[in-house]
């Protein structure tokens, strides 16, 4: 009976040992796959790190470019506001000059009217002077006789 029990335990142990050997063998394959996966992940990680570094460098340069653009736009806005202010000043100056031109035009028209009256008066004075000369000449002739 002990021999039977011994043989039974021996068979159970042998079967258990074979099952454990299978697990060990399977574990070795899993370990190899994990090592291979770890190596692949290390390569991928290195590639990703390199790409990250490139993107970071590119982003830093792009940020600097954008900062420069923002600075130039800010300067342009200041220049634009300055120009707008100058345009407003010029419009105001133009309005003042238009008013002065209108007043000067009115003055010129008034002076033209005065000049025309002066010309008429001069023509009348010349005509009157001619008449007086004629009367004077007639008077001389009369007194000369």
Image (tube, grey):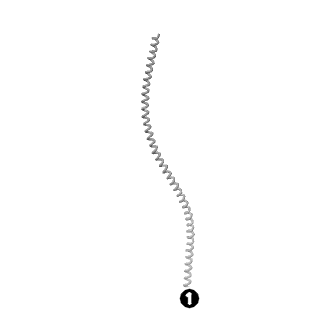
Q: Residues within 10 Å of mark 1 (few under 14, many from 20)?
A: few
Residue farthest to the front? 2
| Horizontal and vertical percent position of residue 46 | 43, 36
**Of 106 and 119, which appears nearest the observer?**
106
| Horizontal and vertical percent position of residue 12 | 46, 16
Residue corresponding to mark 1: 143
For the point 56% across and 65% down, which residue is it?
Answer: 100
Rendering quarter of residue 144: bottom right
For the C terminus, give its image quadrant: bottom right
**Of 129 and 8, which appears nearest the observer?**
8
Q: Is residue 45 left or right of residue 93?
A: left
Q: Is residue 110 above or below residue 31?
A: below
For the point 45% across and 17% down, which residue is it?
Answer: 13
Q: How many marks?
A: 1
Q: Is residue 38 above or below residue 137?
A: above
| Horizontal and vertical percent position of residue 104 | 55, 67
């Amino acid at each position: 009976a002990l021999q039977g029990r011994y043989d039974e335990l021996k068979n159970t142990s042998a079967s258990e040992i074979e099952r454990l050997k299978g697990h060990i063998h399977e574990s070795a394959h899993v370990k190899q796959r994990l090592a291979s996966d770890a190596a692949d992940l290390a390569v991928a990680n290195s590639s990703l790190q390199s790409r990250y570094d490139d993107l970071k460098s590119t982003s830093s340069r792009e940020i600097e470019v954008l900062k420069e653009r923002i600075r130039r736009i800010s300067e342009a806005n200041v220049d634009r506001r300055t120009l707008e202010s100058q345009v407003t000043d010029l419009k105001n100056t133009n309005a003042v000059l238009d008013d002065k031109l209108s007043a000067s035009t009115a003055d010129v028209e008034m002076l033209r009217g005065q000049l025309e009256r002066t010309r008429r008066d001069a023509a009348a004075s010349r005509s009157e002077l001619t008449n007086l000369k004629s009367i004077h000449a007639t008077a001389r002739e009369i007194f000369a006789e």
